[in-house]
Image (spheres, rainbow, N blue to C red):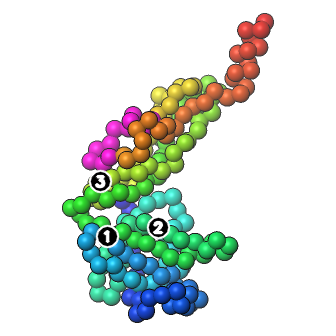
Amino acid sequence: MKTVSLSGVPRAHVGKKDAKGLRKEGRVPCVLYGNDTEQVLFHIDAKAFKPVINTPETYLVEITVGDKVHKAVLKEVQYHPVSDNVLHVDFYEVRSDKPVLVSLPVVLKGTAPGVIRGGKLKLKMKRLNVKGLISNMPENITVDISKLNVGQTIKVKDLKLENIAVTDNSNSVIVEVKTARGVVIAAEDESAE
């Protein structure tokens, strides 16, 4: 799993007025919680979040607050309803000996024979929720589609992953090759003749 470092400043005061003042200065109020640790309240420069938020990747974030370094994953981001500016960010602290739940992007590998025959490839799940130790987390979940024909699917239960477990429904379809409209019409024309 890729790692990003962020530097935070402890928050002296807590409340709406303080948070509003931080946002005017271009700072984002944040909270770090989890694993029986006390909540850590801090703020980070809004520009520092771009590599973490505006990407499909999932990162392990090393946050330096004061003289302590915390390893965490991004849990929730709250946006302004009109301007889409980041209002607040929650981080969940991870430990090397406790499993963590994260959402990883799905990456397709190979070329589906069904697409070559005229089918349409449809990625139904762009991210999968997985649970495991942070040291075992891959950067993404790679799904091989090189044997996928028209009308076939790959479901969550078809994945073979080591040291991590997918928590999504086992019957959920990740990717499928649907029959394209043109292929169906061509088959009907032949049967009509």
Per the model, the C-alpha gap separating discs 1 and 3 is: 16 Å
Could you say which disc has been placed on residue 132 in the image?
A: 3
Residue 86, percent from left and from top: 56, 75
Query: Tag 2, which secondary structure?
Result: strand
Label 3 packing within 10 angstroms: few (<14), some (14-19), many (20+): some
User: Residue extending furthest left?
Assistant: 97
Picture layout, residue 100 above or below residue 34: above
Q: Is residue 115 above or below residue 77?
A: above
On the rendered image, what quadrant is the N terminus found in? bottom left
Dot 2 or dot 3: first in sequence order is 2
Neighbourhood count class around disc 2 (C-alpha, 10 Å): few under 14, some 14–19, many 20 upward: few
User: From mark 2 to mark 1, how far is it between C-alphas?
Assistant: 13 Å
What residue type is disc 3 on? Gly
Q: Which residue is mark 2?
A: 76
Label at residue 34: 1
The type of residue carrying mark 2 is Glu
Q: Secondary structure at mark 1?
A: strand
Residue name at image x 68 percent, y 73 percent: 82
Query: Where residue 47 sits in the image (x, y, percent)?
Result: 54, 79
Q: Residue furthest top?
A: 193
Q: Quadrant of residue 136?
A: bottom left
Q: Farthest residue toward the bottom?
A: 12
Over which residues does the magenta segment extend? 155-165
Q: Nearer the viewer, residue 107 or 168?
A: 168
Q: Position of residue 154 (x, y in %)?
A: 47, 34
Residue 70 seen in render: yes
Q: Residue at x 73, y 15 (%)?
A: 188
Q: CA distance from mark 2 to mark 3?
A: 19 Å
